[in-house]
Amino acid sequence: MVHSPIGRPARMALVALLAAAVTALPAPGSAATVQPGWRDLAAAQAPDANPLEGFIPYAGAYTTFPHSMEWFYLPLNAVMTGPHRFDWGALEEQLDAIAARGHHAAFRFYLDYPGKPSGVPQFLLDQGLLTRPYDDFGNNGQSVSPDYDDPNLTAALDRFIAALGRRYDGDPRIGFVQLGLLGFWGEWHTWPHNGDPGTENWFASQAEQLRVLNAYDKAFDRTRLMVRYPGADNRAHDLGYHDDSFAYSTLPGPGWHFMDLMGQAGTTGKWRTNTVAGELRPELQGCLFNVPMDCPGDGDKDFDTSVAQTHATWLLNHYAFSPGYTGAAYGQALKGAKSLGYELRVTAVRTEQRRRGLDVAVRISNDGVAPFSYDWPVQLAAVGRDGRIARTWTTSWKLTGVMPGEPAELTATLPPGLRKGEYTLVLRAANPLRNGMPLRFANADQDTTVPGWLTIGRIRAS
């Protein structure tokens, strides 16, 4: 690898610049475009799985359905062992196992999960925390609902959230963190104990909900956050939403469905800056993609419209992985999974040699329903005839800004410094997860020169 000299006499710099002059060559088989200098890139079907989108399973090794992420829950007492003590071993074990499979993790901590032992740390019980037993949802007294406004509990949650953010914000193994902690399953409700006529309200007060929202927003700047319900109190926070009753109580109508709440909160456009995801309603997972669809009972049961209105990026759908779909249902489920999130395609490229280097411009379209969730480094590279990358340039391009139906044009100038010869120019968004799944564009020349890279043209250095 040869870099242009810096700090040497001007005469030597000029010689080096001329030696590294770059001339653009047409890409093999490229078609002419209407505008001079632009070359079309051939389209192709999007891959069956791409990072940070689609259907995902509970954590485990599955080969029955394509995926890029895995989901898990953890009780708070698995990591918080004292008022100021944390043992992150249980979380590390999950994150490492998922990352070893090349996948990102999405997860949630809980205090109360019906049917599982309580997640309340023992030190809080020793401090006299009020808890309520219940039999709802098959719990049969196993878990308990804590007093979410107890001062010791609220202070403990503040310390936990701050510690979690300090240690894990920006961790490349993590795709998404759901706020959790409050309510049954950490889903921010205690229905049917929600204050309706004849019932007590066991849920956290508005003040405590806002306290948790603020604590998470302060603790995390890079990792994407999600909360269960859209509302006026979280509209301004830097977080998205998870609809855990997807395609059942998603579409607007009765006033309490997910999209009703999005409209009431004024957050219907928040998908442009924060990810929307969730869980396909468990009762629908095994029947919604049958041909014909044969789900009994109530509910929206309209997957396509739910995706279109929520702009959902990923959904927990464990049925796709175990027991798994077969026949026509598999094809319908795969189509549904691929309809989630983004679908990026480079439609055209333009290269132009100048004294300062090579100007590169690309046009990118997004044929999905949502933008990509992270600003992974977008890189260009020159590949020699030996198939090896001779030089890599990291651009300032941001894929999060490529919106559905709004093609973007991105430009960069690559400084000189290549040895004399011909090179193939390739493009990628670099996955920060070691061994992570490459982001693949819906182009025919994806992976044709170097695995994980899109071939966009050829250049000559002379």
Image (tube, rainbow, N blue to C red):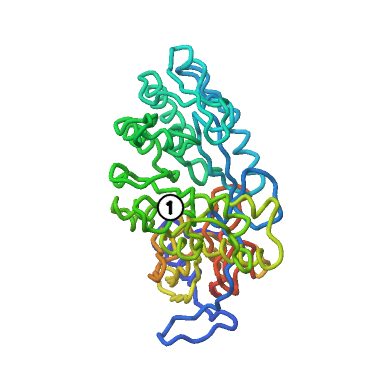
| 106 and 259: which is toward the camera | 259
Type of amino acid at the residue the image marks with label 1: Thr
The reply, left or right, for residue 325 in relation to residue 16 is right
Quadrant of res 217: top left
Tell me where residue 41 appears, x and y as whole percent.
53, 77
How many tags in the picture? 1
* Residue at 64% in and 55% down: 320
* Residue at 47% in and 52% down: 277
Tell me where residue 355 appears, x and y as whole percent.
40, 71
Tell me where residue 158 appears, x and y as whole percent.
38, 27
| 5 and 448: which is toward the camera | 448
* Residue at 38% in and 61% down: 401
Residue 16 showing in the rendered view = no
The reply, left or right, for residue 92 in relation to residue 13 is right
Looking at the image, residue 204 lies above or below residue 384: above
Name the element at disc 1.
loop
| 57 and 131: which is toward the camera | 131
Crowding near the residue tagged with mark 1, few <14, some 14–19, many ≥20 C-alpha atoms within 10 Å: many
Per the image, the residue denoted by label 1 is: 275
| 247 and 307: which is toward the camera | 247
Looking at the image, residue 113 lies above or below residue 383: above
Looking at the image, residue 39 lies above or below residue 128: below
Tell me where residue 245 appears, x and y as whole percent.
49, 50
* Residue at 44% in and 81% down: 38
Quarter occupied by the N terminus: bottom right
The reply, left or right, for residue 323 in relation to residue 116 is right
